[in-house]
Amino acid sequence: MHLEYTVIEGDFVNAGSASSAIKKTLKQLNVNPSIVKRVVVALYEAEVNAIAHAYGGVVTADIDAGKILLRVIDKGPGIPDIDWAMQEGNSTASPEVRNMGFGAGMGLPNIKKNVDRLNVQSTVGVGTTVEMEVNLS
Amino acid sequence: MAFFHALQINENVCEGCSHCMRVCPTEAIRVRDGKAHINEDRCIDCGHCFIACPHKAVFVKQDDFEEIFKYPCRVALVPAVFLGQFKEEISVSRIYAILNEIGFQHVIETEITTPLYTEKKNQLEREGNNKPLISSFCPAIVRLIQVKFPGLVENIMPVKAPLDITAMYIRRKLEKDGWRPEDIGVFYVTPCAAKIAAVKSPVGEEKSSVDGVINMDSLYNRVYKKIKEQGHDYKEVKLPIAQLTSDSILTSLTNGERRLSIAEHSLSIDGIDNVIEFLEKVENDEIEDVDFLELRACDQSCPGGILTYNNRFLTCERMFNRARYVAGKERRGELTRAKEVEDEHDYLFANISVDEVEPRSISLDPDISKALEKMNKIKELERLLPQIDCGICGAPSCDALAEDIVCRGCKLSDCIFIQRNMEAHKTQKVEESLKTMESIWGYEKIENFVKNK
C-alpha cells in the first residue's frame, strides 16, 4: 500500500498530520501498539524537521506485511554534514523555531532510536531524503 | 471474548431513526431492517446513544431490585453523586434512613476509600513510568483507550476504582463482623452505564466485589417516593461510619483527582469528544511533559452520568456546598475520620492493584497480510463513495460503509448515490434500489415515505 502526504514549510500548525494518518492505518492493520508508537515518533520528528529546516516536501509510506518504508523528501536546502547532524544537541534551527519548542538537536538521533533502518541522503542546494524502515512484526 | 454491555436497544421501541448512530464516538452502531444495532466489540458503554435517542429505545440493563433480598446482609454502595441528586434541605442522614427502610441494612459511600486510591495514584505519579499516567477512575475512558488507543493502555494506572476498593472494604468488615461471604450482597448505585459494564466484566481482574447494580434513576424514584410520603414526618439516622472528607466528596467531579495530583503537570478533561481529541495528540507523542491525566467520559464527570436525575450543574453545586461545609469541620478539627477504613489500610492497599489493561483491538484482520488486502479494497471503495457521510446506507460515514462492504457483507449499492448511478446506467432497477433501502430502513419506512402517494 502506498500513501502520500504533503509537508509545507513553516506550517508547524499542521505538523503531525501525516504521522496521524499513518498511525490510523497501522492500527487498523493490527500492528503491535509499541511498533506503531515508534513509527509515529520517528515520522513526526522527520515531519517537523522538514517543516522547520526545509522548503517543504512530501511524506510517502509504503506498507507491506513485513515492514513500513517511510520517506520524507524535502526540496532543500540540504544538510552539509550529515554525521554532525546525527549527533544529539547539534542543531541549525533558527531562534524563531527554538522559541516554538523545536530545534533541540534531537531530531535525527531520536529518529534513529525508533527505526530499524535509517538512511539520510542529502545534497546541498537540492534537498534531503530521510528514509526510515520499521519492521512490522 | 464477549464483553458485557449495559446499553441495549429495545427493538420494539426503536424507530431506526439513526440519531444514536451519528453520535457514537466509536462508530459502533448501524441501522439494519429499520432498527439500530450495537456492535459489541466496539461499544464502550459511554451512553451517548442513550442521550441522543428521541424514543427512549436505548436502555440500561439493571439487576432486578428484588435481587437484593436474596442476601441476608444487604449493602448499598452509594456514590456522593447520588446524594447530590436531592435538594439541600433533604439531609444526607434522612436519605440514609430511607435506604435502610427500603431494604439496605448498610449504606456506605463509595468515596470513603478514595484516600487510598489517591495514595496509590500519587505513588505511581512519583515512580513516573509511562508518562502521562492516565486515571483508571472512569470505566468508559478505560474502555475507550482499549478500543481506540491500544498504544496507551500501559499508561492507564493499574489500580481499582474507589467503588471496587470500597466494596472490598465493606465485605472485609462484614465478614469480620461474622457474616458468611455468600450472605453479603453489595449493590452499587450507578450514575452511568459504563460502571455497570465495569462491574459485570471488570478490566484487569477476575471478578468484582460488587454483587449487583442498581440504576441511580430507579433508586431516585424509590427514595423520592418515600420523601413525598413522609412529608414532614420523617426520621434521620445517625451516620453509621465517619463522613467523607471534603477531598473525597469532590473526587467524582471534574478536577476531583487532578486537584490532589502531586505531579507538576496534570490535566483534567471531561466529555468524550474532548478526551478523544486530546488522546490523539498523546498517542502521536505531540504532548510533552504531562504527568497525569484525569479523563472523564461525561460532561461535568459523574454528575453528568446518563442515569442521574438532577441537572449536572446543580448536582455539582450541591456537592461543592457539601464539601465546603465538611472542609469547615476539617479546619475546626471536628470531622470524625474514617478510622475503621484506616484500620484496614494495609489489607486494602495490598489488594488495590489490578493486572495491566489489555487492548481490545478493532483491526481489520488479525493477519496483517489479509488486513492489508482488506485495507486496499477499502481505500478503493472510499474513492467511489461521495464522502458526505449522509448515513443513508445505515452506516455513520462513507468510510464506515467501505469497511462494512469489505468486512461485514454490505453492498456498494447500499449507497444512495451509487443506486442513482446504477439506475442512470440501467444496471439496476428502481425496484431493486427500493429493496436495498428496505433492508436498511425497514419495510414500513419505505412503504410510508417512498411508495405511498
Image (cartoon, coloured by chain):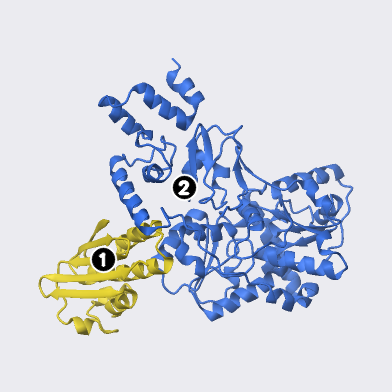
Chain colours: A yellow, B blue
Which part of the image, by quadrant, shows the N terminus of chain B? bottom right
Q: Picture quarter containing residue B354?
A: bottom right
- State the residue lying farthest toward the left: A125
Q: Which residue type does callout 1 highlight?
A: Leu
Residue A56 at x, y percent in the picture: 19, 64
Residue B362 at x, y percent in the picture: 46, 54
Tag nearer the camera, 2 or 1:
1
Q: Picture quarter containing residue B315?
A: bottom right
Q: Is residue B11 above or below residue A98?
A: above
Between the C-alphas of marks 2 and 1, the distance is 29 Å
Chain ID for label 2? B
Is B191 situated left or right of A43 in this image? right
Tags 2 and 1 both on a single chain? no
Q: Residue at x 20, y 84 (%)?
A: A83
Residue B376 at x, y percent in the picture: 30, 50
Viewer can see residue A92: yes
Which part of the image, by quadrant, shows the C terminus of chain B? top left
Q: Which mark is residue A70?
A: 1
Q: Residue at x 31, y 65 (%)?
A: A67
Circle 1 SS class = strand
Circle 2 SS class = loop
Residue B272 at x, y percent in the picture: 51, 55
Q: Is residue A110 above or below residue B283?
A: below
Q: Which residue is tagged 2?
A: B27
Viewer can see residue B335: no
Q: Which residue type does callout 2 highlight?
A: Glu
Q: Is residue B271 above or below residue B118?
A: above
- In front here: B412 or B394? B412
Q: Is residue B285 above or below residue B143?
A: below
